[in-house]
Amino acid sequence: MGKALSWLLGGRRPLASHLLLAPASLWLIFLLVIPAGGLIVLSFAKNGPYGAIVWEFGLHNYARAFDPKYLPVLFRTFAFAAATTAVCLVLGYPLAYYLTFRAGRWRNALLVGLMVPFWSSCLVAYYSWMIVLGKEGLLNTALIRFGFLSEPIGFLYTPFAILLGLVYFYLPFTVLPLYASLDKVPRSVIEAAYDLGAGRWTAFWKVTLPLSLPGVVAGCVLTFIPCLGDFLTVEILGGPRYYLLGNLISNQFMMAQDWPFGSALTSLLLAGLVGGLWLYQRWEKA
Amino acid sequence: MKKGRGMGVYCAALFGFLYLPLAVMFVFSFNDARRNVVWRGFTLKWYKALFHDAELMSAMLTSLELALAAAAIAAVLGMLASYAMVKHKAFRGRSAYDALLNVPLMMPEVALGVGILTFLVRAGYELDFMALASSHALICLPYTVAAVRARLISLQESSLEDAAMDLGATEWQAFVKVTLPLAMPAIISGALLSFTVSFQDFVTSFFVAGIGIVTMPIKIYSMMKFGVTPEINALSVCLLLATFLLIGLNAAFAVRPDEASRH
């Protein structure tokens, strides 16, 4: 027994390594690889009556995803992901900069503080935004009290609410890679720029910003890609008028019972993900 | 020093934005009004209502069991996998394992959820507690692997295990007496993160939980569908405190790089 275990742990044979990795592989294969493959196969099948699946293969589900009824959903998903990434980048860069160069001994505390809303339930945070943005919510009450509005505005269930929710949730995804990259910029290089007569702005534009570019790209990728598959934000803050790809997928499986079409939409989402990561890797190597 | 201050104010404002929802739920969980956002006086009745809500308590129990099961599975899988990745000499397919182990992190949860749902239903497997716990364990796996792996790499440098084997310990003895105890803080830290991930998870449960399995986030979601009730605020505050506690515990167990190399 002890001998067998020692053999397993020693790992002088590849078989021992594969055996130790077997339990994790089992999980990955049965709950990730096969389900994803199954969805891709299913995406070429046909939907029968009452959600039955007819195994006649074709591209009809993909054609349907691009017909005028659903195309706006794909566009909207792309637009919201792009807008969220842009806003997160503009809002997050100064924060990452501050954390790296100015926060001093508060740095670690602030980094943990940045993660707390992320680690607490997104569902609960969005619920709270509902209280803030609602017709009788805090924002309306405050705006009326201070005379900026005479009638309450429906902030909730608008593109504004969706963007706000997305930015709220994904901001740490942008800031952390930015921080990691800014932290790697050698201080000596920035000081050299100052010594050579560069002002604050010149040093930033010519030295710090270009050197932090890998973080900018990583932050954008890590924000944009999860945004494409977001589901909860529109479910709670947006409503059916602004369905994104994730909501449309969910609907096919939970309400419409059109699993082949849902699978095709999911395959498109995965294609977007793989394509994005591929572009990122190419950029990284270049 | 004025230039620095403007940026500090900006960052404080951004943190204000991130913490506003948390502050709002905290304040309104004590507000004595059902529908209004105007302050009507202090009350604890929403907290009392929580503990008298049998359905809520049973959802809480389900979520706790689920998070424990998922964290335990992910810890074992993650420990074994990281051990082979770090300690074993290079073998064919290691980079494939490496890539695959990180996929659950990048995979959109909607895709993961509908994929598992479709697979299990087509395979004729009932959507039971084990199915959900296994799905949660999959999402948690990258976190435990990352935590344990970092620790094993830093232990590798200290070569304590080699020392034990030079003194005549078998690989198994060195593992039980040296590596496992030293890796334990990282295993616990990974398990705590997994517990948090599983306990908060809504999307995967939304798709994979069969009828009759009601987790806390699913319960909150169905309460929200009925409209705003201050009970959710009170519940959220409790969950938030639990999250703070878990993050604090995690910080206590997480090993700083400088500390690891001191052994």
Image (tube, coloured by chain):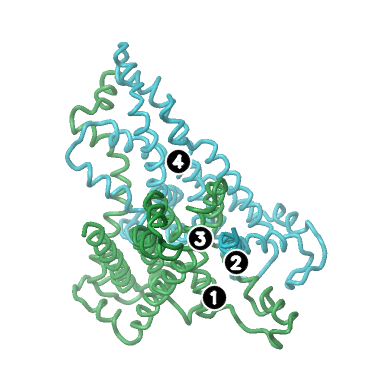
Chain colours: A green, B cyan
Asked whether disc 1 touches disc 4, contact meaning CB atoms under 8 Å apart, the reply is no
Asked whether disc 2 touches disc 1, contact meaning CB atoms under 8 Å apart, the reply is no
Q: Compared with residue A60, is residue B61 higher up or lower down, i.e. above or below?
A: above
Q: Amino acid at mark 3?
A: Leu
Q: Compared with residue A282, is residue A249 higher up or lower down, i.e. above or below?
A: below
Q: Is residue B121 left or right of residue A142?
A: left
Q: Amino acid at mark 2?
A: Tyr
- Look at the image and tell me whether residue B210 can be seen: no
Camera-nearest label, 1 or 3:
3
Under tag 4, what secondary structure? helix
- Look at the image and tell me whether residue A27 can be seen: yes
Numbered mark located on residue A95 in the image: 3
Q: Is residue A188 left or right of residue A117?
A: left
> Measuring 25% from the left and 25% from the top, which residue is drawn there?
A10
Q: Which residue is mark 2?
A: A127
Q: Amino acid at mark 1?
A: Ala
Front-lying residue, B258 or B47: B258
Under tag 2, what secondary structure? helix
Q: Amino acid at mark 4?
A: Gly
**Label 2 crowd (10 A; few <14 / some 14-19 / many >=20):** many
Q: Which residue is mark 4?
A: B190
- Chain under callout 1: A
Front-lying residue, A234 or A216: A216
Camera-nearest label, 4 or 3:
3
Numbered mark located on residue A17 in the image: none
Same chain, labels 2 and 1: yes
